[in-house]
Amino acid sequence: AQTVTQSQPEMSVQEAETVTLSCTYDTSENNYYLFWYKQPPSRQMILVIRQEAYKQQNATENRFSVNFQKAAKSFSLKISDSQLGDTAMYFCAFMSNYPGSRLTFGEGTQLTVNP
Amino acid sequence: ETGVTQSPTHLIKTRGQQVTLRCSSQSGHNTVSWYQQALGQGPQFIFQYYREEENGRGNFPPRFSGLQFPNYSSELNVNALELDDSALYLCASSYRTENEQFFGPGTRLTVL
């Protein structure tokens, strides 16, 4: 079974600064997907960024980028130029690469962006 | 394109009762997954439905059951409610062959 660990229950950052959220996972599979989801107080789970394990290049989506270290089973999220709207719970998640796979989530990191 | 919707938004039940939660998948999506998110924790996979059949189940007892209808909408039923069933229940729809799941806003269930 896969496990996902987020060791930072809470983090804070000043507006316009950069913050990095950590995630480690454990799996015996070689091909899989990793995700970062954002859950604001509205509760809607929103996909932030996705990484395919067979791709060496780190994924980037505007101000969001990841540092994917497959050998170390590490998948961190960097948020640049933090905005007040980035305040939310962030979840790291794992999915196997076969049809109908489930998401396995970490415990989450509460990020607060301060003005 | 209509997103994933869930009803009701909030629900209060008492221990021992039964509850049905509903989910309408995003247009065209043929797979629905259900997750339970206890307060302060990450979502936990309950089960998944594809072509109206259960297609994978997490570590949840049989009193958690579901249905999927021909239009791909889905229901989650929980019998003999326990206090620990209090949680946010999230529904996610997807194409079976693709990895991205689209989440609904959730149903907040409180068991007293």
Image (cartoon, rainbow, N blue to C red):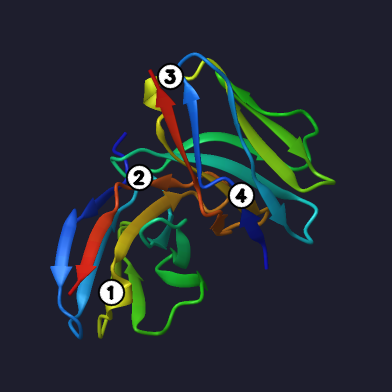
Residue that carries the numbered disc 1 in the rendered image: B77
Does residue B97 appear in the picture of this structure?
A: yes
Within-10-Å neighbours for mark 1: few <14, some 14–19, many 20+ = some
Q: Are marks 3 and 1 on the same chain?
A: no
**Position of the N terminus of chain B by quadrant:** top left
Rendered residue at 51%/76% (across/down): B59
**Label 3 crowd bin: few (<14), some (14–19), many (20+), radius 10 Å:** some
Rendered location of residue A15, percent (x, y): 45, 17
Q: Tell me which amino acid carries mark 3.
A: Gln
Q: Which residue is mark 3?
A: A83
Q: Are marks 1 and 4 in contact (CB under 8 Å)?
A: no
Name the residue at 16% across, 63% down.
Answer: B11
Residue at horizontal 40 percent and vertical 52 percent from the top: B92
Q: Which of the chains bears the disc numbered 3?
A: A
The chain ID associated with circle 1 is: B
Q: Are marks 1 and 2 on the same chain?
A: yes
Residue located beneath label 4 in the image: A7
Residue B8 x %, y % = 17, 57
> Spatial distance from mark 2 to mark 4, Cα to Cα?
33 Å
Residue labelled with disc 2:
B26
Q: Amino acid at mark 4?
A: Ser
N-terminal label among 1 and 2:
2
> Where is residue B42 drawn, in percent x and y?
47, 56
User: Disc 1 versus disc 2: distance between alpha carbons?
Assistant: 21 Å
Q: Position of residue B18 (x, y in %)?
A: 20, 80
